[in-house]
Each structure stands twice: as C-alpha cells, then as structure tokens.
Amino acid sequence: MTERQASLAARRTSALLRKFVKPRLLGTIASLRRFQALVERVSPEKRAPFIPDVPGDWVPATGAPVGATLVYLYGGAFLVGSSRLFRFIARDFARAGFDVFTPDYRLAPEHIFPAALDDVLHAYKALLASRPGPIVLAGDSAGGGLAVALMLRARDEGLPLPKAAALFSPWTDLAVAGPSARENEEKDALFTRRVILSGARSALGRTSGKNPLASPVYADLSGLPPLIIHTGRDEALRDDSTRLVERARAAGVEVDCELWPDVPHAWQWMGFIPEARESRDKAIAFLKQKLAVDAAV
C-alpha cells in the first residue's frame, strides 16, 4: 500500500464537511431521498435496449471503445441512490471507452438484505445472457461492498466473473468491527461509528453483520479477479478496505490498494478535488490493463 500528500482542496473540503455536514448527517436521509426523486423526475429513463426489463441506466461509450461493459454499483449506505442519480459517474467511465450499465437495486429500510444483492445479481445474469464481451465492475461505498458480494455469488453459482473490479471506499463490514471505526471517528470527514451502525441496522434487518455476503470482509475471497481499492487514510471505514485487502491477498487475489490522506469518503465523485480525477484515472487504467492482459491470454 502506498500513501501520498493531500491537496489543499481536499483538506478544505474535508474540514468543511466535518464542521457543517457530519453533525447533521443522520437527519439528511429524507432530504437526500427527496432530491433523488427530483433528479429522477427530470432525468429520462435510459434502460439498456438488450435487457429492457431490468431496471437500470445504460450509457454507451463516448470515448474510444475498449470493447467491454462496465457495471457500476452506486453507494448511499443502501438507503439512498439510483442509477439516474449517479448517471454523471457512468458518463465519466463512458468517456473512457466503456459501455456502462448501472443497475438499480431496492433500498433499505423498506427492503433489507439480501434485496440489493438479489437485484444486482439478477441484472448481472441478464447482462451475461444478452451482452457479448468482457465485463468489469466498479462501485463506491455500499456499492463497493455490493460489488464484492456480487462476485462471490457469481463465483459460487459458477457464473463467469468480471475481469477486474475497482472499489472506492468500499463498505465491506456491516458489523463495524474494524479498529478505524473508533480510531478515525474524529478525523473522518463524514461518519461517526454511530452513523455507520445506524445504516447497517437499517440495511441488515435481523441478518448478522458478519454474514459474508452482507459483509464480504468475512468471506472466503478465493477465485476473485484482480481488484484495485482506493480509500481514505482517515476514513472511519479505512479498515473495511485494509482488512479486505489482507484477506484477498491471503486467498491469492491480486490487489492494488492505495490509501489517500485527508480525502472525504468516496471523494472520486467530487470533481473539484484533484484527487478525484487522479483516482478515477488510476482505476480506469487498471481496468483497461487487466482487460488487455485477459485478451492476450
């Protein structure tokens, strides 16, 4: 794992979030859902034409095509999020040459585990059956953990696996047992341990937080494709990444992991931070490199 120095923009953003957003975060879910509903009302639905019955958003490549489909799984603590709300992320990957499909999944607390996993697995199977060519995965926060769980389900069901996956600040431990949940509670720009636990309870229902498909940090990770993982050094969820890396490498999985200082959770989508573009570019380069290696075999 490597570390680096933070930009002034990243430090200022983290400080502002820590002061003005973090103390009020639990009370923002209803407002975020209202904003999501507004975005969906003004954003036309664009389902993939080859799987029109699968809820999700399809963004064809606008850059030089790489000949692969990227499945993007958005975050939002399983409480907020939709493919249209995160369309701007899909467009970034499309500019890099990927055809991008962002499946929608049901949200908590109305729909608890394993609803989200069942939905993305259904979408993945439909994509495999209808779309030729290689697939790669990317996901942030809850979507990052969901991406790992999806690969575990695909592996266990004997389905073709993605060629590689990029995980941004993945939430992989809904038991919230990593030491960083306490050690970084003050430094984290957004989350306290209490907030993380509250989100986990809403998503899990009666399921144990150590269920390996809800919290893949507890899973057997053998057989997974190469992973690139970027997370903040000062995040409360830092150890959701570092422990996943340790278990993945112990299982023989190739992992490229980088810790970034003084960046907010899932900073990759804050375009005003230089580290956002740098992290996305590194992830895109990693995915393309693994596709090239696979094509050469």
Image: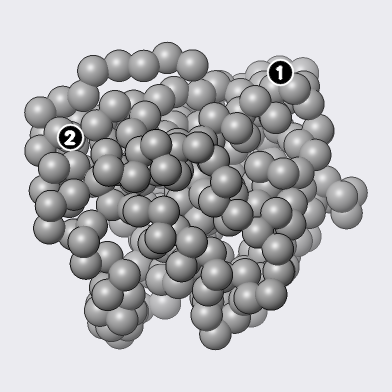
Disc 2 secondary structure class: helix
Q: Residue at x 46, y 67 (%)?
A: 198
* Tag 2: amino acid: Ala
Q: Position of residue 283 (x, y in %)?
A: 45, 31
Q: Quadrant of the C terminus?
A: top right
Q: Is residue 55 above or below residue 75?
A: below
Indicate which label's residue lies in the foreground, 1 or 2: 2
Q: Is residue 44 visible?
A: yes
Q: Residue furthest front?
A: 182
- 242 displayed left or right of 17: right
In which quadrant of the rendered view does residue 8 lie?
top left
Q: Position of residue 72 (x, y in %)?
A: 51, 53
Instruction: Return the residue at label 2.
Output: 10
Disc 1 secondary structure class: helix
Q: Position of residue 184 (x, y in %)?
A: 35, 38
In the image, 59 versus 150, the foreground residue is 150
Instruction: Return the residue at label 1.
Output: 296
Q: Is residue 214 above or below residue 183?
A: below
Q: Is residue 61 visible?
A: no
* Tag 1: amino acid: Ala
- 87 displayed left or right of 97: left
Report the disc number at residue 172: none
Q: Is residue 155 above or below residue 45?
A: above
How is the rendered protein coloured? one colour
In which quadrant of the rendered view does residue 103 lie?
bottom right
Q: Residue at x 87, y 50 (%)?
A: 156
Q: Is residue 253 above or below residue 50?
A: above
In the image, 184 versus 146, the foreground residue is 184
